[in-house]
Image (spheres, rainbow, N blue to C red):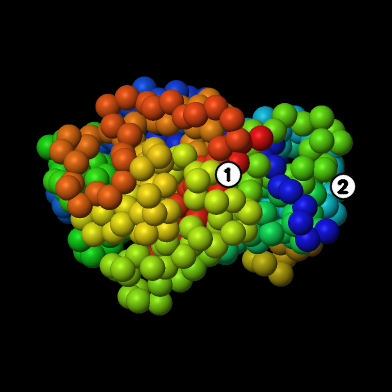
Amino acid sequence: MSNREVVVTGLGATTPLGGDVATTWSALLEGRSGITNLPEEWHEKLPVHFAGIAAVDPSEKLERHRLRRLDRTQQFSLVAAREAWTDAGAPEVDPLRLGAVVSSGIGGILTILNQYDTFREKGWKRVSPFTVPMLMPNSPAAAVALEFGARAGAHSPVSACASSAEAIADAIDMIRSGRADIVIAGGTEAAIHPLNIASFAAMRALSTRNDDPQGASRPFDVTRDGFVMGEGAGILVLESAEHAAARGARVYAVAAGAGYTCDAHDIVQPDPSGEGQARAIHYALEDADLEPADIFHINAHATSTPAGDTGETRAIRSALGDITDQVAVTSTKSMTGHLLGGAGAVESIATILALRDGTVPATINTDQLDPEVAVDVVLDKPRDLPTGDIAAINESFGFGGHNIALVFRRA
Amino acid sequence: MAYSDKEILDGLGEIIDEIAGVPAGDVTPEKSFVDDLDIDSLSMVEIAVAAQDKFGVEIPDDQLKDLKTVQDVIVFIQK
């Protein structure tokens, strides 16, 4: 049971670029930015006036009475999960063999803040009786489990911006260990609120390029000045290869392996040596039973922060050595912004589609490549990948020193 | 201010549609909240608060649990 191969059979996403996977993917290939201005009334109090707001509001996709009892993180996760489930062919599966691993980096913070406003203005009786099941960090996993009757287990690993990559890693394990045949896995974030913008701005993590919002997320560029907050969700249907084959499912890619490490260096700064990041790649390759030479593409974490992006490229080179020269590296955050707890899943979807279509989206806005960048970044236009048995990596890191590398192999 | 049974029924229909997604037309006096309209206890709390806002009658928690049907609520508000 321990070596069961895990494949990807369904994809779903709702992002600043589109309300589904197809729209998001075509926008990524076109090099479009999903960043827009925040409401005017927020500008005066905040140093940042833009974000990656979801292109399609979940209120357009979910029933009205359900919206009021679901936090926005749950709403995004349900929209993406429904798409992924349909995309997987709405598989027939024993509920006891179906799992859900869905994360959020921050949890139901919009519910907390909105209900606190209600409490202060109107008193405790006007606080929604659904406040607790909306704010709890496991609420997206629970909502997805409830929607699809996933009774094998519902989990929500939390590791800040690595959360949904960790969810996918845990889902792979859940299938390999024999606990489930299918797992709905991914992550979601919905934290665009003045307090959260202020909180990230207070740590000087956000770009303040207010005169050029769509150019603000510029990973690897010498003038990058911080990340751009985004919102949305990505969900994958992961399935044992055996189960997928038995039902004749269409397979996007093999979810070949995962590597987890922690820097244990600083609560927010990445370890400048990149040792933990490089080790995550090593572990992931080992777990996938692959060599550096199998890797031709990396969807980098690269959030457009001064320290993060170049450090990551050094870590990639230290992990892959000279093989790094064959690897097309991109940061799709240049277009989506940073979806925090949703990032790893949305970027895993981009990684999988790059393998499927044999093309890597270009990083946009990188007008002047930082000379410290130690990898080959795809710029200007999408780049073709070789045909044949190749693999790609999605990297996700989170405050707290969490590093996750996921390896996907062409099916 | 006094309301007719019809006014209360229509008002409850709107509230229940909004909160629980049950079409207002399905909200008729004889219906049981739990058995017929599939409304859970947390939604009942929301409905009671909304009914208070609409009709100015507070429904205390210890009495809310005894209101089983739509008619029970109409009678309570009329009292």
- Locate residue A70, reporting x and y percent: 57, 49
> Picture coordinates of residue A144 (x, y %)?
67, 48
Asked if residue A93 can be seen in this view, the reply is yes
Q: CA distance from mark 1 to mark 2?
A: 26 Å
Front residue of A14 and A350:
A350
Q: At label 2, which amino acid type do we have?
A: Asp
Residue A9 is situated, as x and y percent measured from the top left of the image, at: 69, 36
Q: Considering only vertical position in the picture, is A63 above or below A118?
A: above
Do the residues indicated by labels 1 and 2 lie within the same chain of the protein? Answer: yes
Taking the spot 69% from the left edge, 33% from the top edge, the residue there is A251
Task: Tell me whether the residue at label 1 lies in contact with that at label 2, contact meaning CB atoms closer than 8 angstroms.
Answer: no
Q: Under tag 2, what secondary structure? A: loop
Chain letter belonging to callout 2: A
Tell me the subunit letter for badge 1: A
Label 1 SS: strand
Residue at (83% x, 59% y) in the render:
A1
Q: Nearer the viewer, residue A326 or A378?
A: A326
Residue A27 to residue B71: above or below? above
State the residue position of label 2: A94
User: Mark 1 = which residue?
Assistant: A408
Mark with earlier residue (1, 2)? 2
Q: Out of B24 and A273, give the one closest to the viewer.
A: A273
Left or right placement of residue A350 versus residue A372 in this view: right
What residue sits 42% from the left and 58% below the top? A319
Task: Answer with the quarter of the image where residue A245 lies.
Answer: top right
User: Does the rendering let one see residue A14?
Assistant: no
Q: Picture coordinates of residue A102 (x, y %)?
A: 60, 53
Q: Residue at x 82, y 43 (%)?
A: A242
